[in-house]
Amino acid sequence: MSLLDGIKTIAELPIENKRVFLRVDFNVPMDGDKIADDSRIREALPTIRHAIERDARVVLASHMGRPKPGKTDGLSLMACGERLAELLGIEVHMPEDCIGSTARKVIFDLRDRQVCLLENLRFHPEEEANDEAFARELAELADIYVDDAFGAVHRAHASVYALPKLFRDRGCGLLLEKEINALGKLLSGPDRPYVAVLGGAKVTDKLAVIEALLDRVDALVIGGAMANTFLAAKGANMQRSLVEPDKFALARTILEKAAEKKVEIALPTDLVVAASTSAERGEVVSVGAMPENTMALDIGPKSVADFAARIGRAKTIFWNGPMGLFEKAPFAAGTFGIAQAMANSSGFTVIGGGDSAAAVHAAGGDIAAKIKHISTGGGASLELIEGKKLPGIEVLRQ
């Protein structure tokens, strides 16, 4: 069964001359009052343009950050609206709120092919509370519901879960369709060998996805600070590295389960270490030979070569989580090396959003362009890989 079974795409919905509530994910990183990365806005453009070309009146809605109830400085969607207007080359109307008389006036004055962007949904605490009355107020603004916010479909929030239930005509946008298709390939008969690369800070954060992947992959490659806990559990002295001592037994259990299921687990054999995260250079050492008072901040060149070779032999590769502190130049080589290996692969390559997506873009546009699919949702992609039913997707099924 396809994950899209029972879900209409925007191409199948009768949106001509209708007001379309289009849930997007404009939760972009900000640098003061400027957008630091507009890729989430760019990812939404195909669906927005599709709606415009079919003479719809487009009502965009998104959240940003975690505001306190009421308006919060720095979390208005005004900058997103201005950037969207530049990218589309048309005016984007922006009411001061997402509900109420002001929003209704702007929306009911829209003509075919015009676009408005509602203010931050989370300025109302009812959004995260999945409040039905709030959803009903939003429902008054449109005739058809389309969700294109993959980064939010794992949240049962009002605009994602309560709202679509109020529409007979509801479905997914082009981005959400692309995400479901790409990640669905990892769940239903992926080409083998299938290798998963996991990094990031904590075993705790990835426990559920590790358990799920052990039933699906041929090899599990583990780097980043998460690898420190596995290495320490196997007896390595990790000095001042970030580890989770209370997860040593769990790490050993995972290694035992992997052996039983004949899933190979690859851990770093060398590391880039330094005395602090602010160090201007790192030292490459073998695992088990870390100098006193140092911490592991990246995987070393031998580990990069080993991991890259495994990626090169695989036909399906899923990557989530950086290999080290890639934001700092002395500790970026491991993460960027994995990004390059993913770009060089002839297999089906998927990046699971979040920090991994940021790392691939930081590694260079030529690298990002060669990846088959870069997800726009970190948490959502992991939960889908775990095999969970995501509320924002399930509610779209007819």
Image: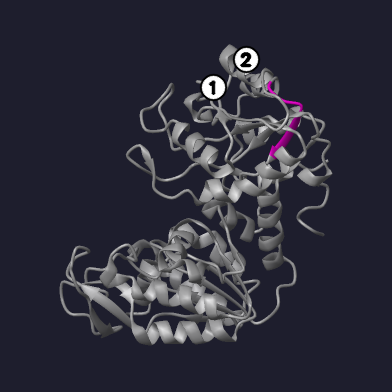
Q: Which residues are magenta?
A: 141-146
Q: Which residue is drawn at the image coordinates 38% and 27% (left, top)?
A: 72
Q: Quadrant of residue 187?
A: bottom right
Crowding at dot 1, Cα within 10 Å, few <14 / some 14-19 / many 20+, comes out as: many
Q: Which mark is residue 370?
A: none
Amino acid found under the numbered disc labelled 2: Lys
Give the vertical position of 53 relative to 216 (above or below): above
Image point (53%, 75%), residue name: 343
Q: Is residue 148 left or right of residue 342?
A: right
Q: What residue did someone put label 2 on?
A: 105
Q: CA distance from mark 1 to mark 2?
A: 9 Å
Give residue 295's position: percent from left, percent from top.
Answer: 24, 70
Residue 225 in the image: x percent, y percent?
36, 67
Q: Position of residue 278 (x, y in %)?
A: 19, 63
The residue that mark 1 highlights is 95
* Rendered position, 61 above or below 375: above
Which residue is rendered at x = 65% and y = 53% of the image?
Answer: 388
Q: Is residue 386 magenta?
A: no
